Image (cartoon, rainbow, N blue to C red):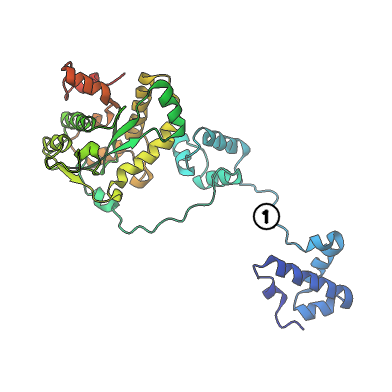
Amino acid sequence: MSPVGYYTMIKSKDKVFVYGIRMQMVRYALEEGIKPAMRFYKASRNTVKKWLRRYKEKGTVGMVEESRAPHHIPHKTVKEIEDEVLRHRESKPKFGAKRLKMDFEIPCSHGAIERILKEHGKIGERKKKKKVRNNLREIKDKYKAFERNCLDTKHLYDMPAYWVQMRALRLPKYQYTFRDMKLGAMFIGYSKELSLSNSTLFVEVIGSWLKEHGVKTEGTIWQSDGGSEFIGSWQAKKKSAFIKSIENLGAEHFQIPKVTYNADVEAVHNTIEFEFYDIEGFNNNDNFFAKATTYNLYYNLIRKNSNRKYMSPLDTLIETKEDIDPKVLTLPALDLDRLLEDKLNKNSSLGGHDVPSIIAN
């Protein structure tokens, strides 16, 4: 008699071992009979007869475990919805299941969408999430709107889909980004060069815009890394024009010691890359700024952020009940090259209602 029962042995994850046990049991039943095989392998009559029947019908192939999945699933998503999911995914290749459901209002759960994408090879296995050392969400929730802000730049020439258009149409090479930590709101500017002058101008325009719409900049903190476009030369003994422009707003500049301190703005750089640059086509420079402005308005007014209770920056601003004009979130994408030229030529001023008029249309 086998010292270990049949059901104990087939729990092994080694498929070759399980296959071998079944073959031995079937051969024993053929030579000695079904009852002796039942006693020796401590298996039921039905089990021995089942594998004996499969062996007679299919030979050794019949010893392989067959899938127990049902042939018909009544609650499975209908083909029309599957096609809709795949069509939207095709147009937005880096959108996840939750984003597809939110943006396109697909009539099934995000779990069903994820299953569809996985079945069609659109997504792989999930990466194991890193353990969060410090949960900063609660800290950020206590900030007031525009109390703490991040500034950074993004190089645009390392994205294949955009690079071709950038070269052909002479589009901007750099993005200047401002992001508020409370609302998650984003303001963007563009230029063909990375410079301290552009960073300074970017701060001046945004500072004027915020004040015009009821934001008190005094006592706020604006942080950036130690890039030359922000601090000038690392050997400089005086504050750069960028830092001085922040202090002129009554705010304080904080130079981050680590890249992770700017995670808020780095996150939005990743998002705008696959939601905008990877999928949009442009006709010319003006068309680029028009589409960049449209995306920025969508991001600030409509787009739900899963990390912020599935609320848009506008939703969060309304929830705070602060005395700030919601139109503050409608700043167009800034053409910093044009703004700098206008400033040098003294053809236009910064701030107030003049700000929108000097943006590229």
Classify residue 104 as left or right of residue 178.
Answer: right
Reply above or below: 186 against 307. Answer: above
Classify residue 288 as left or right of residue 149.
Answer: right
* Quarter of the rendering occupied by the C terminus: top left
Residue at x-position 35% and y-position 29%: 173
| Dot 1 crowding, Cα within 10 Å, few <14, some 14–19, many 20+ | few
On the image, the x and y values in percent for residue 75 come to 61, 47
On the image, the x and y values in percent for residue 283 come to 43, 19
Amino acid at pointer 1: Ala
Number of marks: 1
Q: Which residue is mark 1?
A: 69
Residue at x-position 69% and y-position 57%: 68
On the image, the x and y values in percent for residue 244 come to 13, 36
Reply above or below: 239 against 32. Answer: above
Quarter of the rendering containing residue 254: top left
Classify residue 328 as left or right of residue 24.
Answer: left
Residue at x-position 19% and y-position 34%: 324
Q: Nearer the viewer, residue 159 or 301?
A: 159
Classify residue 306 as left or right of residue 346.
Answer: right
On the image, the x and y values in percent for residue 293 come to 33, 26
Quarter of the rendering containing residue 339: top left
* Quarter of the rendering occupied by the N terminus: bottom right
Quarter of the rendering containing residue 194: top left
